[in-house]
Image: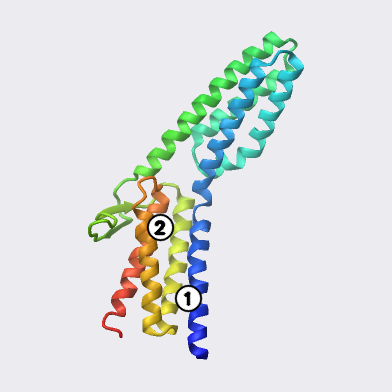
Amino acid sequence: MKTYKKAVLLLAALLGLLGLLLMASFTTYDACEVANSNTLFIKEQTQLALAAPNFEKSKYHTFKALKSVYTTKQNFKDCGCESASEQLVLTEVNLKNVIKAPEFKDAKTFLDIALKNTAICLKVLKNFEENQNKGTYGDDLLVLNAIQREPPQEAVSLPENQELQDALKRSLSKFQNSMDDVLNKVDCPEALKFIEKVQVQSKERLLNPELSQAKKYYHYGVLQIADNASGQLKGCN
């Protein structure tokens, strides 16, 4: 009974670890989503500043936009899209010029330019994320077999961002170590139940057509580790 309880606790901990590893793996990629969201807010505040009835009200919205620019700089850096970061810098410069402008009509000129900067920034971010999702075939490939209603046989490459590559490899390595613990410390029937749950979860997530390249690579990696582990326990009763 004591051994069984230990096994259950270990499996519960490993299932929790699976979720934590997934969240920890995509800090860099999620930064792009945060950067996009913040840019939309900056654009909205810039539009409000441009449509404001007076200069003071316009400055109020300009300050809000600038504050968001300052807080999202690290997100842009983590995202890794340099072209979008350049547009953010230009947005900041023009918003600062609004504050320095002697008259409202001069401020509107800078606001109009800043608004165009945010539009370009959003477009660049969108293209960047689409390219990340497409991926390319290279040396770092995972190929898995599939059946109907399961992820199709497909080669999945690592994203180009080096920092994200390292994070994904670390997370998959940790998951491999955790799976080794299951194989070595948990009774065969319980280990198979755990592995089956991991396989089902991974396949369900891989059926999501909106899955990013990074998450797709991660879930294929987890599925491959689980499949290999299942093969090692083949024939167990």
Asked if the residue under mark 1 is in contact with the one under mark 2, i.e. CB atoms within 8 Å, the reply is: no
For mark 2, does the 10 Å Cα neighbourhood hold few (<14), some (14 to 19), or many (20 or more) residues? many
Looking at the image, tell me whether mark 2 or mark 1 is earlier in sequence order: 1
Q: Secondary structure at mark 1?
A: helix
Structural distance between the alpha carbons of marks 2 and 1: 20 Å
Q: Amino acid at mark 2?
A: Tyr
Q: Secondary structure at mark 2?
A: helix
Residue 85 vertical position relative to residue 225 in the rendered view, above or below: above
Q: Quadrant of residue 225?
A: bottom left
**Residue most extreme to the bottom:** 1
Where in the figure is residue 220, as x and y percent of width and height?
Answer: 35, 59
Q: Nearer the viewer, mark 2 or mark 1?
A: 1
What residue lies at 45% left-to-right and 47% top-to-bottom?
Answer: 161
Residue 39 horizontal side relative to residue 158, left or right: right
The disc label shown at residue 62, or none: none
Residue 195 horizontal side relative to residue 73, left or right: left
- The residue to which callout 1 is attached is 11
Where in the figure is residue 226, as x and y percent of width and height?
Answer: 35, 69
> What colour scheme does the image use?
rainbow
For mark 1, does the 10 Å Cα neighbourhood hold few (<14), some (14 to 19), or many (20 or more) residues? many
- The residue to which callout 2 is attached is 218
Residue 172 vertical position relative to residue 5 in the rendered view, above or below: above
Where in the figure is residue 158, as x and y percent of width and height?
Answer: 38, 52
What residue lies at 38% left-to-right and 39% top-to-bottom?
Answer: 131
Q: Amino acid at mark 1?
A: Leu
Residue 12 vertical position relative to residue 96 in the rendered view, above or below: below
Where in the figure is residue 84, as x and y percent of width and height?
Answer: 51, 32
- Taking depth in this image into account, of 205 and 33 the one nearest to the observer is 205
What residue lies at 71% left-to-right and 27% top-to-bottom?
Answer: 63
